[in-house]
Image (cartoon, grey):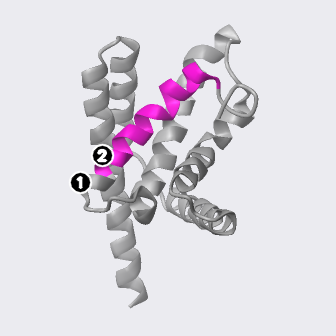
C-alpha cells in the first residue's frame, strides 16, 4: 500500500503496522507459524485495523491531512490480502479467502462480538500518540488477545448450537 494505491506511509505505520505486529505475535503464541491459517487472528487483524483507522481519521481528518475515507475502509482487507500474498498463495485462492474473511467478519460484527476490546485499542492509540511505544505495543497485544478470545468463544457457541 503506497500513497498511489493505498494509505500513506505514516498512515500505514499508525494503522496497519501495529495491528499486524500484534496479530503475528498472537498467531505464533497460538502455535501456528502461518498467520493466514488462524481464522481468529485474521479476523482480529481486520478488527484492529478498522478500529485504528477510525482513531486515526478522528484525530487527523479535521486537519485535512489524510487519505480518503475509502482507502481507510479498504485497509483491513488490503492488509489481509498483503498477508496472503506474502505466503505466495495463488491469486484465485486469495480471492476466495478474502471473500470468506469478509463474510465471516460481517457475521461476527453483526452478532455483536466486538466491544470491550476497544478500550485496549484506545489505550494503545493514546500510548502511541504519547510516544510510549512499549506501552502501545503491550496494549495492542492485549487488544488482539481479547479480540481473538471473543471470536473463539463466538465460534464455540455457534458450533455448539449447530450440533
Residue 31, horizontal then vertical, whole percent: 25, 62
Q: Is residue 52 magenta?
A: no
Left or right relative to 51: residue 22: left
CA gap, disc 2 and disc 1: 6 Å
Left or right relative to 146: residue 102: right
Task: Find disc 1 in the rendering and name its residue.
Answer: 29
Callout 2–callout 1 Cβ contact below 8 Å: yes
- SS of the residue under disc 2: helix
Considering the whole magenta stretch, tell me its main secondary structure.
helix
Residue 88, horizontal then vertical, whole percent: 56, 59
Residue 75 falls in image quadrant? top right
Residue 109, horizontal then vertical, whole percent: 52, 56
Residue 103 falls in image quadrant? bottom right
Q: Which residues are magenta?
A: 8-26
| In the image, farthest residue toward the top | 63
Q: Residues within 10 Å of mark 2 (few under 14, many from 20)?
A: some
Residue 136 falls in image quadrant? top left
Residue in the image at 26% along x and 59% along y: 30
Task: Find disc 2 in the rendering and name its residue.
Answer: 25
Q: Quick one: quadrant of the C terminus?
A: bottom left
- Asked if residue 20 can be seen in this view, the reply is yes
Residue in the image at 36% along x and 50% along y: 147
Relative to the observer, which residue lies in front, 161 or 80? 80
Q: Residues within 10 Å of mark 1 (few under 14, many from 20)?
A: few
- Asked if residue 113 can be seen in this view, the reply is no
Amino acid at each position: 500500500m503506497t500513497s498511489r494505491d493505498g494509505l500513506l506511509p505514516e498512515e500505514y505505520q499508525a494503522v496497519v503496522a501495529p495491528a499486524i505486529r500484534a496479530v503475528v505475535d498472537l498467531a505464533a503464541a497460538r502455535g501456528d507459524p502461518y498467520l493466514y491459517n488462524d481464522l481468529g487472528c485474521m479476523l482480529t487483524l481486520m478488527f484492529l485495523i478498522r478500529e485504528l483507522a477510525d482513531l486515526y481519521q478522528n484525530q487527523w481528518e479535521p486537519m485535512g491531512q489524510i487519505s480518503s475515507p475509502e482507502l481507510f475502509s479498504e485497509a483491513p482487507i488490503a492488509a489481509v490480502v498483503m498477508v496472503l500474498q506474502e505466503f505466495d498463495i495463488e491469486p484465485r485462492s486469495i480471492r476466495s479467502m478474502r471473500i470468506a474473511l469478509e463474510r465471516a467478519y460481517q457475521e461476527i460484527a453483526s452478532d455483536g462480538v466486538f466491544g470491550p476490546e476497544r478500550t485496549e485499542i484506545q489505550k494503545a492509540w493514546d500510548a502511541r500518540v504519547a510516544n510510549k511505544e512499549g506501552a502501545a505495543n503491550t496494549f495492542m497485544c492485549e487488544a488482539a488477545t481479547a479480540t481473538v478470545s471473543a471470536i473463539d468463544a463466538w465460534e464455540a457457541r455457534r458450533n455448539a448450537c449447530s450440533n
